[in-house]
Amino acid sequence: MEPDASLRGGVDPARPKRNPKLPRQKLQLRDPESRAATGQEVALGFTASQARVEVLRCLNCKDPKCIDACPLHIDIKAFVSHMVDGDFGKAFETISEQNPFPGICGRVCQHELFCEKVCLLGSPKTKLDPVAVGSLERFAADWHRQSGEVRRPAVAPSNGLRVALVGSGPASLIAAYDLVRKGYRVTVFEALHELGGVLAYGIPPFRLPREILREEIDRLRDLGVEFRTDFIVGRTTAVEELFNQGFRAIFLGTGAGLPHLMGIPGENLIGVYTANEFLTRINLMQAYEFPHSDTPVRVGARTVVVGGGNSAMDAARWARRLGSEAIIQFRRGRAELRARLEEIEHAEEEGVRFEFLAAPVRLIGDAAGLVREIECIRMQLGEPDDSGRPSPVPIPGSEYRMPVDTVVMAIGQSPNPTVQRATPQLLTSRGKIVIDEHGQTSMPGVFAGGDVVRGGSTVILAMRDGRAAADAIDQALASDRILAARAPLPSRPHAAGNRIMVRRQLTPEVAWIEVEAPEVARHWKPGQFVIVRPTAASERIPLTIVGGAAERGWIHLVVQAVGKTSRQMVSLQPGDRVADLLGPLGHPATIESVGAVLCVAGGVGTAELLPVAQAFREAGNRVTALCGARSVSQIILDRELRSAAHDVFWSTDDASGDFQGTVVDLMRMWRSRHPDPLAVAHVIGPIPMMRAAAALTRDWNVRTFASLNPIMVDGTGMCGGCRVAVDGKVRFACVDGPEFDAHQVDFDDLARRTRAYLDQERLVLQSV
C-alpha cells in the first residue's frame, strides 16, 4: 500500500521553534451522518501538518511528569523530540522500546487519565490544553505502518525456557513481548478463534480497526511468539499439565469476561443482551454484515443501553449503525460517566441520546417473549459510595415506562471463572485471582495480572500488569536460565488437530463424525461439549461429545443438519479440517452409584445420551434407556446404546418401533410395568420432550437432570448468551451447566430463547 501523502513528510530540516500557545490539534473525523452507517474507523488521525503543530506545543520539560504517569513509562519527551526533528521513524522506535502496540494504544488508551493529565500545559496555571500525546503516538504508528519500514527490536538469544501465557488480551500480549525479547520461548493460549481478547471482542472496529490489531500482534509472531487459538486452559489442559509439558512459568491474563446482570424481572426476554454478547456478536462475529455473516443480532427500532462506561458507548453506537434509535440510560449524572470524553462526544454526534439519573426496575415482554417495554425509576444523587462517586438514590413514586425493542446491560463484568474453578488451589477473592507484590499467585510458578486480578479496568493498566509479571517471571527463573543455557530444553510440537478422520451417515440428516482433537480426547467426560466452526466464515455452535478415543486423539460427534452451520459440518469429508474446535466445555454429567437409573432421549438426543448411559452403567447402576424417533428409519445408534444400557426401548410416531407414541408416553408405559424404586432420571432432547419428561418424573418424585443446549456464542462464560432460568435465577449453561435439575428449569423461557433467531436462520438458509 502506498503511504498516505499526509504521513510521508517530516518537518523542516531547520529545527523549528516550540510554541506552547499553538492551539491543540483536533483529530480529523468522519462526518456523523456517514459514520453512523458504517463500521469504518471514525477518527482519521492527524495529518503530518497537524502532527508538526502539535509536537511544537510540547514544553520539553526538564523533569517531565508524563513519563512516570504513563503506565508503561514510554519516553514521551524523547519521542516528541524526534518528531520535532522530523524523524518519525526514530519516534516510533522510541515508543516501541516500551510499547509494541502504539497503533492500538494510540487509539484506545485513556491518555487523559495518565500522561495528558499531568502535562504541564494542562495545569490550572497555564490554562492551556495538554499535548495530545495519544494522537501523536497513533500518528507515529500509522506513519511507520504506511511507510513500509521494518524496525525489529533486539531479541536476546533463546535461553530455552518456555513460558505459557493464558489469554491473548493486552496483559498477555505485552508480557509476551517483554519475555520473548529476553530470550524466552513464549506460547500464548487463547480460547477464542481470534487473538486480542477484549481488543477483539469488546472494542468495535470503528474505534480499533482489525487490521491494526492483527498487524501489531503479527509483530510478536515475527519475534518468535507462538499463538494457539481454540485452547481454553482449565478445560483443554489444566494449569498443572502445562508444567508437565515443559513450561517453567505460567501467566494468567484471562480478563474479566463474566458479564453482570441486574437481577430484575424480564432479563431473560428475547432482545435483552449483556454488553459482552451484543459486542461479541457484532465485533467478533461480524453480525453487522448479516446475512453475509452467519451470526445475527437482534436490534429493533429502539435500543436502551444501561450503563455509563466505554462498553455502553460502543453498544449504543453500534445500535445507531444498525438503524436503531439508541438511548444510554445511566443511574448517575453526566459528570459521573466513566467512558472517555471522546467516546461520549462521538456518541452524541452520532445521535445517541442520554437519559441520566434513571435506572430500570423491570423489563416487560409480549406473549412471544420479546422485550417490549422498560420500566424505570428516577434517581437523585446522595452521599459518595465506595467508588467515591455520589450514590444514586431511587425517588419513590417516580416510576415510568417507555417502549423498547432491544436492551443491552453494560453494567460491568467479573473475571471469567474457568481457570479458577479448575484450579481450586488458586487463592481468589470474589472471583478475582489474588497475587502478591510480585504478581505471583498462591501456586508456585503461576503469575496473574490484568482484569482477572483487578476486575474490569483499562487496557493500559492491564498492560502495566503484564509488564510487571514478565519482570517477576524473569527474576523467578534466573537460576533456571543458567541451567537452560547449559542444556537447552527440547521443544514439544503440538498436533494440528481438527481433521475429520471418520464420517458415516446415520440417517439422511444425521452424520457420525470423528475429529482429531488430542487434548479434548484426553480430557472430555460424558455430558461435556465442544464449540465448533466448520469453516472460517461459520458461526460458533455447540456440539455434545458422544465419545472419544484418547489413545488415538479422536472425539466423536453426531450432527443433525438443521441450520446452515450444522449442514456445513455434516458436509465435511475425511481429510477435511474443521476451522475451529474448542473444548471440552461445561461440567460433566452427574454420575453416581445410586441403583436404578432411567435415561431418556428424543431424536438426535439419543447420541448425546450414549456416553451418559455408559457412564452410569460403569458406575454400577442398572440403566434403562428409553428413546424416541419419528420412525424406525430415524433410529440411530441402537447397537451402541444396547451395549451401554441394560435395557433399551424405542417409541416411534408411526408404530414401526417397540411402542407407538412419544417417548414420554413410553415413560408412562414403562413405569407402569416397573414400579420398583428409581433413583435418578437423565433427559436429553427437544425442549417440549424434556419439559414433559420432567413433569412426569416430578410426579414420580424421582430426581431428574436435563442436559440443555441453548444458543451459544463463545461457550466459555464470556458473553452470557446461553442464559437459562433455573429455580428463578439466571444461570449460564456453558459454565454452570449444561446439566441442571430438570425440575427447576424454566422450559418455557428456554424455548422462547432458542427461537430468538428463527427468522434470521431462515434468511441465512435462503441465501445458501
Image: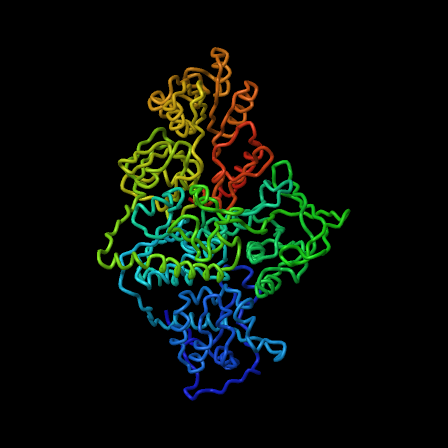
Which quadrant of the figure contains the N terminus?
bottom left
Rendered residue at 34%/54% (across/down): 163
Rendered residue at 42%/39% (across/down): 585
In the displayed orientation, state which residue is furthest to the top: 673
In the displayed orientation, state which residue is furthest to the right: 397
The picture quadrant where one finds residue 691 is top right
Q: Is residue 37 left or right of residue 337?
A: left
- Closest to the observer, 650 or 611: 611
- Residue 421 lies, with reference to residue 739, above or below; the image says below
Percent from the top left, x then y, of residue 582? 39, 43
The picture quadrant where one finds residue 488 is bottom left
Q: Is residue 466 left or right of residue 124?
A: left
In the displayed orientation, state which residue is furthest to the front: 479
Percent from the top left, x then y, of residue 73? 46, 69
Percent from the top left, x then y, of residue 252? 42, 51
- Closest to the observer, 51 or 43: 51
Mark count: 0
- Residue 743 lies, with reference to residue 360, above or below; the image says above
In the displayed orientation, state which residue is furthest to the left: 487
Q: Is residue 98 left or right of residue 748?
A: left
Which quadrant of the figure contains the C terminus?
top left
Asked whether residue 3 is in view, the answer is no
- Closest to the observer, 140 or 94: 94
Percent from the top left, x then y, of residue 269? 60, 40
